Amino acid sequence: MKMCRVFFAMAVLSLSLAVNSTSWDYRHHQASRHRYTIESTKTAMDAALQTPHPHLDIRSIKVIQSSENQPVHGDTRVRADVVGFEKDVEAFAAAGTLQSITSIHVGNHVQGKISTTLSPMKVLKHEGYSEHQVIAKDRREVLACMEGTEGYLDDLKGKTGKESMLYTKNPFFDCFRPSHEVFDFLDTMTEQNPDFMTKYENVSITYEGRAIPAFKISTTSKQEEVIMPKKTLYTQALIHAREWQAGAATFYMMASMLDELRAGDKAAINLFDNFDWYFVPIVNIDGYLYTWNVNRMWRTNRHLVHWNGQEVGVDLNRNWPPEEYFNLDPSNVDQETYPGEYPLSEVSSAGLFDFIRTLDSLGGILDMHAFGGQVLRPFSNQPGSGVEPFGSKMRTLGNSVRNALSTHPNVQYTSETGANLYRAYGCFDDGMFLEFNYTVPALTIEVEGSDFVSPQASIRSVGQNIHLGLRQFAQEAHEYTQQEEVEADVRKEDQLHINEFGRNNALLHEIRDRKKVLKAKLDTLDDANTDLMMGEGDNSFVETSEESAQEYIEKRVEEANTEFEKLQTEEAKLEARQSILKKLLYSRFGQSINLEDS
């Protein structure tokens, strides 16, 4: 008990220092940042995202639409939730104000230019929101909660008998908790429930050398494991350090499962008749500690590197294989999403990757995040959901989990692919889905909420909701993997062909999109050439000779045509290869696989 009080005193001291320190690190922000809503077309948002925005925290991007079934295209209206300084927000919005620009050069000098504004971005400042004040208020409230619930673990350890208490009612869930309290609570549940819960002390390790533990919830004895092994589910949380609510919801889910098993709940028993469930409750322990002691908004791990003149950590949710999808677009990387030097460069990622691959009969994977109320399925690294029937099966699975989570008119989740709004490379769920060749469903769940700083009163309500969603995921994962078992066996050779077909299909989409852009450019140049020959012009031209303008246009036309022809050649090669792959795969799987674009 003395040791627990020492740990508590240390937590209170670190929180007090964080609340009162004037040197507290706000990612190099001396003044307070504010919150903004930015609305625009998807095309404009994509343009803004492609530009450097080192001091902006883009927390979420969502579609503004009446129906979830509407396709997302360049003209779709989207809304971004952004925190930053006013000048940085203005620069971001300016970058997204699309312009059609044609420059006329003579030698190295620009002699003329047409510039037309196409789509301005709408920026709304949230008056009264100060990040500094929000965080300081949260620190005070968390500190008061921890002080008010001191002794909860001693009370828990004093309880005996399965009917004496509910873990979800324990004051542990009144507050957000630092990592040592989280593990003390989970260790106590493990000690009190040896028939249901097992701890694995070290399934990986952090950059700073901390062991990353895992916990298994199961109704299977060690003897039964050998005779009749079950499928396994894997869930992790807090890969991003500041997403406290996602962690709390995961801890609550684990406690709920134990409460149900201890009470003999039939639905829970049936679930665990089919599955053993593994949890890694805190992936990014180093970063999580840093959010408690220094910077509440820290996202990455604590492996600090110098990148673009800044000191940044590695985003552990951009550090996953396969190699061919790793960091494909460096212009998309900022100080929050630096992916590391190569896939699994981080010791924590590499260790977890190896651990997950050792799990027998893996049946489903979940990555818990905050915030926004989203069920995200692969892929983030390419358009679409992958080859059929896997894409449709994942869509059905994701929609079913979405429905289970949408428990109230004010709590409505969406279900979509990660790339529905923007591309991201090296994400955990994509890496796992590809690693197991589409046969193991993998989802990311962004728990409901409107900020990384959430009210502590919401811990239980969000946890109860996530409990429903994860139970639904288990049911859907069981059906998904059952279907896989009755279909034709997927050989390694088949898996390689399926993966190649998916990569080629993504490349074909990109080539065709680029051809559309070039076709539009050629049409614009043709119009400019016509205007020039007819003596018409635009006031935005700087005066230049007709001969220079003509030469410029002809050169641009030649360049565009050359690129267009190269793309056509590459497209033809890929289409020929796709035709061969279709024949191979259809001969193997018949109507159980669909390789046609929907």
Image (cartoon, rainbow, N blue to C red):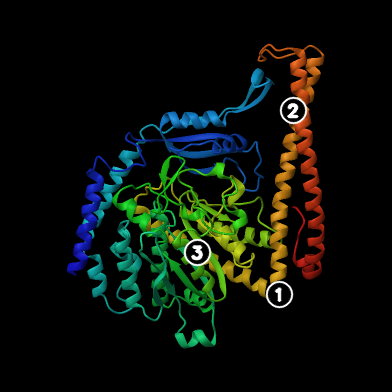
Packing grade of label 3 (10 A; few <14, some 14-19, many >=20) is some
Alpha carbon of mark 1 to alpha carbon of mark 2: how far? 52 Å
Q: Amino acid at mark 1?
A: Asp
Total number of numbered discs in the rendering: 3
Which residue matches tag 3?
Answer: 470
Pick whichever of labels 1 and 3 is earlier in the sequence: 3
Labelled disc at residue 556: 2
Residue 249 visible within the image = yes
Instruction: Tell me if label 1 and label 3 are in contact, CB under 8 Å.
Output: no
Q: Amino acid at mark 3?
A: Leu
Alpha carbon of mark 1 to alpha carbon of mark 3: how far? 28 Å
Labelled disc at residue 404: none
Q: Nearer the viewer, residue 26 or 321?
A: 321
Judging from the image, what secondary structure is the residue with disc 1 in?
loop
Q: Position of residue 75 (x, y in %)?
A: 65, 36
Q: Position of residue 496 (x, y in %)?
A: 70, 65
Answer with left or right where residue 187 lies relative to residue 588.
left
Which residue matches tag 1?
Answer: 489
Where is residue 104, by image quadrant?
Answer: top right
Residue beneath the point at 42% across and 76% down: 261
Alpha carbon of mark 3 to alpha carbon of mark 2: how far? 55 Å
Packing grade of label 1 (10 A; few <14, some 14-19, many >=20) is few
Q: Amino acid at mark 2?
A: Arg
Residue 389 visible within the image = no
Answer with left or right where residue 580 lies relative to residue 133.
right
Pick whichever of labels 3 and 2 is earlier in the sequence: 3
Answer with left or right where residue 306 lies relative to residue 536.
left
Judging from the image, what secondary structure is the residue with disc 2 in?
helix
